[in-house]
Amino acid sequence: MDEYLILMRLDMVIRETPPSPEQVQQYMKQYQDWVGGIAAQNKFVGGTALSMEGKVIKSKDVVTDGPFAEIKEWIAGFITIRAKDFDEAVSLAKGCPILKGGESNSVEVRRLTGGHNG
Amino acid sequence: MDDQQLIPHLFRTEYRKIVSVLCKYFGLGGIETAEDIASETFLTAAQTWGLGGGIPPNPTAWLYSVAKNKAKNYLQRSHLYRTRIEPALQGSEDTADYLIDLSPQNIIDSQLQMMFAICHPSISTEAQIGLSLRILCGFGIEEIANAFLTGKDTINKRLFRAKEILRQGKISVELPSADEIEQRLSPVLATIYLLFNEGYYSISQDKTLRKELCLEAMRLCTMLVENESTNTPQVNALLSLMCFHASRFEARLDKDGAIVLYQQQDTSLWNADLISKGGYFLRRAAAGDKLSKYHLEAGIAYWNTQHTDSKEKWENILQYYNRLLQIEYSPIAALNRTYALSKANSKEEAILQAEKLGLTDNHFYFALLGELYKDIHRQKAIENFQQALHMAKTMTDKQAIQKRLDQL
């Protein structure tokens, strides 16, 4: 089993109109049902959602609020999972509900190479 | 209470107090001495009260004063006392009173401190439970052996080894400091919960004994709640969870100690008082920002006290299981989560997810699939129940599965 990072990217355009509380609750349910399904297979390692605000540090000590001004895609959160190979990791990632939330949303799957090869 | 019952009753309530207080002075190295002195105190009581002396007006005070004297005699014989303690006590009137403080507050403090010493991660969880039953709950070796369905020798050996480890590890009898509490509470709560489960899910058919195990676990947890430094949200969550579970104690076992399944339970036997206590502690657990597994399990247990099926009930249970599994995976939580998924979302979705669980060595897995296929594909339901029946180990499980098969 290897560990994989699942990175969730949201298209900023859909963020322009804030979702209603009911929508937020619905997103949360879908997200939790997806992660819960991975955890029920004992394949969830860790991860979290991320807050809306953020800072970007560039060379020469330039710190900006962002990264929203410059890029369209916004990292909404990440989880790490256990999978036997890339195929399995991708099939687990395919269930991520943000993929149903907009055509420009995306999920990136990366294998962690930091020595978790248990 | 008649005279015949008085000494066993006092043994159950006072033995643990005397042992804990004495251990505070002797250290864990002297745990056996403390136990010996406490046992001898009860022997003296049985002899004196029985042989014409009659029961004294205040039996507990009598026991304490005998225990104090025995401890004093022991200390005076010991090298440590003569060389170190006695010189320091020059001029003090009553050395035994000074040394052995059996005031209510010190009894509580000592028991709390013993709880932290015994629930130490360096000894096995089985031994922690055994020692807790003996030292913190005053159970006899035979009762402990019955609870574990094993022999007295096995228990004696297990407790002896555990005491050796505590002695060698130089584990001190004291409350952890404020910044350590959270971390040190974790094994204490784990032991209390295991003790509770030992009673709740025990394979022993002895209903009285099982109930006592549950009540003892709740009593220990109550002590933590009543003590300021250990009254954390997590501790309240665990107590809440145990109250909710215990509320069904009378309903879930029949008169022979066999399990009555949730759906078939007589809800008039559910204990409303315990349910409301569970609610009280769950509200107190809501302080703070940390969601422990006890919070989530208490949330699930709360919804299980609502017998009527509703969308809201199953949606809440599903979400608690989703979070619980992210904190701590267990096959039983994975199976229960999938059942909740079938109720909250759909059976079709639950079947798809069930097949990914990888629990084909677990008969509950096949029982779950049988349940999910029941109204969708009768043949598959039967096949799965038959597989579950084939794999089930206990009579209770086999009977429950056979019942489902007969209904199809």
Image (tube, rainbow, N blue to C red):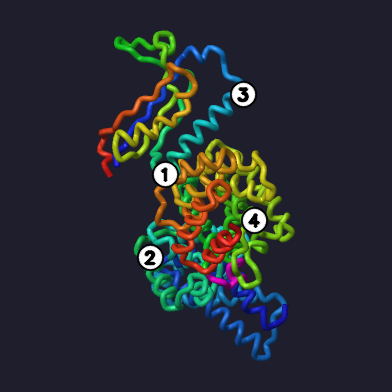
**Amino acid type, label 1:** Lys
Numbered tag placed on residue B263 in the rendering: 4
Question: Quick one: B311 or B331, which is closer to the camera?
Answer: B311
Q: CA distance from mark 3 to mark 4?
A: 35 Å
- Number of other residues with Cα within 10 Å of mark 3, as a class: few under 14, some 14 to 19, many 20 or more: few
**Residue at position x 58%, y 79% in the image:** B42
Chain at tag 2: B
Q: What secondary structure is marked by label 4?
A: helix
Chain at tag 1: B
Residue A33 falls within the magenta-colored stretch: no
- Number of other residues with Cα within 10 Å of mark 4, as a class: few under 14, some 14 to 19, many 20 or more: few
**Residue at position x 50%, y 75% in the image:** B141
- Which is more foreground, mark 2 or mark 3? 3
Q: Which residues are magenta?
A: B204-212
| Position of B398 relative to B284 (above/below) | below
Q: CA distance from mark 4 to mark 2?
A: 49 Å
Disc 1 marks which residue? B356
- Which is more foreground, mark 3 or mark 4? 4
Whole-percent x, y for residue A118 in the image: 28, 45
Disc 3 marks which residue? A21
**Do residues under tags 3 and 4 come within 8 Å of each other at their CB atoms?**
no
| Residue B82 image-quadrant placement | bottom left
Whole-percent x, y for residue B245 in the image: 61, 55
- Which is more foreground, mark 1 or mark 2? 1
